[in-house]
């Protein structure tokens, strides 16, 4: 275990999810961590979703490191808590603890920024393509899912409390998902019978099982030893006794020479050719192979099976639909990145792969589409911590 992992585990032993009221509520217009086509992602929104991410991590991995999201760039609060809560790290230099705190913060930050920026991109792309999702549609889906997953309002409220989310957060997630699904639907293809047949013909082995054979073998170093083993078997000595006495094969020596369910191509080539052209229950050999001389007998033949195209169609259709879904997701993400990454910038502390170098607009820019939505309301539980 690396030193960092040890220290991170120590951090997780005492850290609590925490957002200061000042960080969540005192931001003024323009206090943003990123800008997407003139639409800001506010520090308030970022801090709130950091809180949600931290709560999620804490519930999924009890004791895992959780960091205060509003502490950078000095991480003084984080360092102070480490000093107070982990005696074993009392003598660890500030710079070392700060580096660990920063790494934890960056891990959360990258997830949150990716979530928020992608949410803006999907909404912007939907507006560009004239795709709409109404509040009524979102609310209907939300209500249906809530009623399926939660038996009572109290259960739902407990869920909100445990995850640090608000109803507005959940509605935001449902809206983004609905938009994303519509973007996918525009690019979804149709699985045709021709495509199913082509897949079947090029993947025949997936829809059947090859012929297999059960064998008994004795492998010897010399031909004379193989002949001696063969003579012993013909004189009705047991395979168990003969294999134990003569065989050099460590896999079958103590099991009567048994090889079960052997498919073509799995054994020594010489044995493979001989065994798959032999009848059952006939002692054969010696056969010279790569590892010595074989005496063998085929005890059982299990015939190959093959599903028909009709039998394989449901599975193939599901496979092709899954592939199309994956391809559509990649296409949508590549498209929104292409259209909107050049209009996306972040402050240096919040930079990530899809967002670099903050460049505030010189003058307010009216978006060509309705401004993307993202909830910024912090739960009462978060502001009290």
Image (cartoon, grey):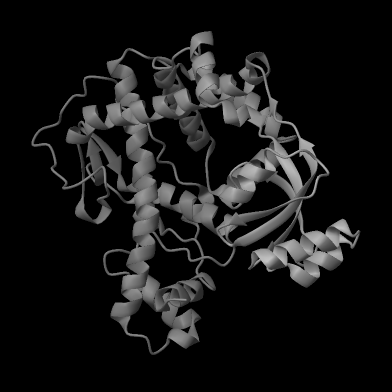
| Vertical order, 5 against 306 (above or below) | below
Residue 223 image point, x, y percent: 66, 63
> Is residue 150 shown to the viewer in this render?
yes
Residue 331 image point, x, y percent: 34, 26
State which quadrant residue 225 falls in. Answer: bottom right
Q: Determine whether, in the image, residue 247 is placed left or right of residue 54.
A: right
> Is residue 252 shown to the viewer in this render?
no
| Vertical order, 267 against 204 (above or below) | below
Task: Give the tally of numbered discs.
Answer: 0
The residue located at (46%, 61%) in the rendering is 18
State which quadrant residue 104 falls in. Answer: bottom left
The residue located at (83%, 44%) in the rendering is 281
* Furthest-bottom residue in this view: 91
Residue 357 image point, x, y percent: 16, 48
State which quadrant residue 187 falls in. Answer: top left
The residue located at (35%, 43%) in the rendering is 114
The residue located at (69%, 44%) in the rendering is 275
| Vertical order, 319 against 215 (above or below) | above
Residues 273 and 346: in front is 273
Residues 267 and 199: in front is 267
């Amino acid at each position: 275990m690396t030193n960092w992992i040890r220290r991170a585990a120590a951090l997780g032993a005492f850290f609590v999810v925490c957002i200061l009221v000042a960080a969540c509520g005192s931001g003024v217009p323009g206090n943003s961590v990123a800008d997407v086509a003139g639409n800001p992602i506010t520090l308030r929104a970022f801090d709130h979703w950091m809180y949600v991410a931290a709560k999620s991590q804490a519930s999924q991995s009890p004791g895992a490191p959780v960091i205060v999201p509003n502490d950078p760039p000095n991480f003084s609060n984080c360092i102070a808590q480490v000093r107070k809560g982990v005696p074993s790290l009392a003598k660890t230099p500030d710079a070392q603890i700060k580096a660990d705190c920063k790494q934890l913060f960056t891990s959360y930050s990258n997830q949150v920024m990716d979530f928020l920026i992608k949410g803006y991109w999907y909404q912007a792309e939907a507006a560009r393509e004239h795709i709409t999702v109404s509040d009524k549609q979102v609310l209907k889906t939300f209500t249906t899912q809530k009623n399926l997953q939660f038996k009572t309002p109290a259960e739902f409220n407990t869920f909100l409390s445990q995850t640090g989310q608000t109803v507005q957060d959940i509605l935001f997630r449902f809206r983004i998902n609905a938009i994303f699904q519509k973007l996918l639907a525009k690019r979804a293809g149709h699985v045709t019978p021709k495509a199913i047949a082509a897949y079947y013909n090029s993947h025949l082995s997936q829809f059947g099982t090859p012929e297999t054979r059960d064998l008994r073998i004795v492998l010897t170093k010399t031909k004379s030893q193989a002949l001696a083993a063969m003579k012993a078997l013909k004189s009705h000595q047991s395979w168990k006794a003969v294999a134990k006495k003569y065989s050099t094969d460590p896999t079958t020596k103590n099991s009567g020479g048994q090889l079960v369910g052997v498919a073509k191509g799995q054994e020594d080539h010489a044995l493979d050719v001989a065994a798959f052209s032999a009848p059952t229950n006939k002692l054969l050999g010696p056969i010279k192979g790569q590892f010595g001389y074989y005496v063998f007998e085929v005890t059982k033949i299990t015939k190959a099976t093959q599903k028909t195209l009709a039998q394989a169609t449901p599975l193939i259709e599901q496979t092709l639909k899954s592939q199309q879904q994956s391809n559509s997701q990649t296409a949508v993400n590549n498209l929104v990145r292409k259209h909107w990454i050049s209009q996306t910038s972040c402050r240096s502390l919040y930079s990530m792969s899809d967002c670099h170098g903050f460049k505030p607009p010189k003058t307010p820019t009216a978006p060509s589409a309705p401004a993307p939505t993202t909830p910024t309301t912090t739960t009462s539980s978060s502001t009290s911590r």
